Image (spheres, helix red, strand yellow):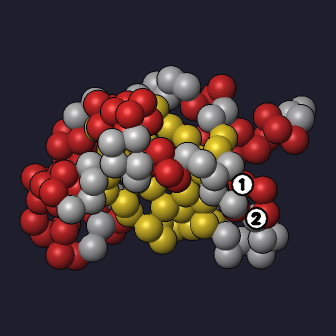
């Protein structure tokens, strides 16, 4: 039997296990970690760090094309990574993704961009999100499903 923290960590790792390609880093963040609504309307937010965003989006578009807008899905992984690098400060978010009885939002970023933002606050985009409650459960680091 799991303690409540261990059970929560396993639940947070679920989308990574069941839905998405492997990642190098993951954290769940935001106020829903502390104040989730029991009716399932809360959306859990994730930051996913990957070595090669182009490769990751290519695999994810094959697995989960419905996670992307029709406009981005048609243009392919090159357009997704171009948009992330030019307009999205290195990260591309897929919001309102259904998973079991919940909704999740995940942002995919290259490990180099994530590391630079956390260490130098050069963009303060992702590091700003990490000012909220963050959960980096041991079951997510490293993710090798």
Q: Is residue 7 left or right of residue 56?
A: right
* Residue at image coords 60%, 66%: 43
Q: Nearer the viewer, residue 105 or 3?
A: 105
Quadrant of residue 33 in the image?
bottom right
Which x, y percent locates residue 17?
A: 52, 40
Mark seen at residue 111: none
* Res 143 seen here: yes
Q: Position of residue 88 (x, y in %)?
A: 27, 59
Q: Secondary structure at mark 1?
A: helix
Q: CA distance from mark 1 to mark 2?
A: 6 Å
Q: Residues within 10 Å of mark 2 (few under 14, many from 20)?
A: some
| Image side of residue 25 versus residue 65, left or right | right
Residue in the image at 52% along x and 53% along y: 129
Residue at the (67%, 70%) spot, across then down: 42
Instruction: From the image, tell me which residue sits under label 1.
Output: 33
Q: Please name the residue that numbered disc 2 is placed on.
A: 36
Q: Between residues 113 and 120, which one lies in front from this camera angle?
A: 120
Query: Where does the image place residue 103, in percent across and percent down from the top left?
Result: 57, 67
């Amino acid at each position: 039997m799991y303690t409540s923290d261990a059970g929560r960590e396993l639940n947070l790792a679920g989308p990574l296990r069941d839905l998405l390609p492997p990642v190098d880093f993951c954290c769940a963040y935001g106020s829903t970690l502390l104040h989730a609504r029991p009716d399932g309307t809360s959306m859990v937010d994730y930051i996913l760090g990957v070595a090669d965003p182009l490769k990751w989006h290519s695999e994810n578009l094959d697995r989960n094309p419905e996670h992307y807008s029709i406009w981005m899905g048609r243009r392919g992984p090159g357009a997704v990574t171009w948009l992330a690098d030019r307009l999205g400060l290195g990260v591309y978010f897929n919001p309102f993704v259904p998973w079991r009885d919940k909704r999740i939002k995940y942002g995919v970023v290259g490990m180099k961009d994530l590391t630079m933002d956390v260490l130098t606050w050069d963009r303060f985009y992702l590091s700003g999100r990490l000012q909220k409650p963050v959960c980096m459960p041991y079951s997510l680091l490293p993710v090798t499903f």
